[in-house]
Amino acid sequence: MNRIDNIRKKIAEGKLVKGFFLTMADPMVSEIAGYAGYDYVWIDAEHGPLDRQEIFHHIVAAQGSGCCAFVRVPVADPAAMKAILDMGPDGIIFPFVDNKEIAQRAVQACAYPDGEIHGVRGQGPIRAIKYGLEDEGAYLKTAYEKVFKIVQIESLEGYENLDAIMQVKGIDSIFIGAADLSRSIAGKGNDLDLNTIYNDICSRVRKNNLVLGAAIGATAEDAARVTAKGVQYVVFGQDARVLASGLKANLDALKDF
């Protein structure tokens, strides 16, 4: 059983899958998250300053410490994703999937041309086949299934096109990007309510048998709130903020000295 199958098994058993959000370059953060017991790390190449080499090191460190490595790419661009996929991540996160066409590009970027998805991924796995120590032919047959494909709904357009997006073959999960979604709703100057839309997304995703994910605060109350809506995996805590709050707490403990 590979790493992503362990996550799928945990979800099937009704257990909440927990992830940690990474923006800092040092792979020690990924390694610590794995040893601490997180199920996956969210390596952010959309907002974070990470380059390819740093992403690679995070993937290696996370997987070496027992957790999955999910990489959020800036856009569903096959050319930009080739190198990341060849590093052997366990999942790819696609931001701002606003319509069916973007969703199709996303899954096709993860698939080789000879499969039923009719993908556009170029052949050249490196770390994904343990640098040639594993059979490349065998890898090519299972590579697509080993990558957990997550699309984010982060805009009113994405919400309005949700049904069409969910019909794209190959998507594993819908992740609600509540922060950007709320800005998108507010920007339209209408009476739409984020909570109503959030609940509707949750209901429709679960009815379509796709895995549902969301970001939460690091509290039991937040976890209870989203799991009651059907959320099956979460990301909480961000490396720089956790470090900042920890450092501040240490200082505050000695503020009288």
Image (tube, rainbow, N blue to C red):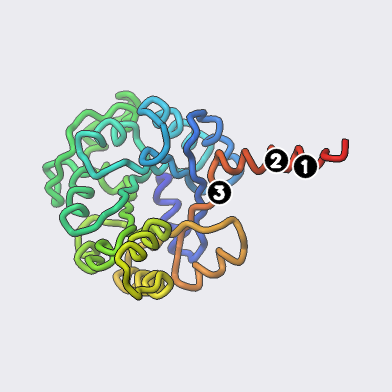
Tell me the distance, in whole angstroms, between the alpha carbons under discs 1 and 3.
21 Å
> Observer-nearest residue: 178 or 221?
178
Kindly state the secondary structure of the residue where label 2 is placed: helix
Eye-nearest disc, 1 or 3:
1
Left-right relation of 112 to 196 = left
Tell me the distance, in whole angstroms, between the alpha carbons under discs 3 and 2.
16 Å
* Residue identifier under label 2: 248
* Residue identifier under label 1: 252
Reading the chain from its start, which is encountered first: label 1 or label 3?
3
Please state the horizontal and vertical placement of residue 248, each as a whole percent of the image: 70, 40
* Residue identifier under label 3: 237
Q: Name which residue lies at 56% across and 39% down.
A: 240
Kindly state the secondary structure of the residue where label 3 is placed: strand
Reading the chain from its start, which is encountered first: label 3 or label 2?
3
> Observer-nearest residue: 17 or 139?
17
Query: Does 177 sit above or below residue 32?
Result: below
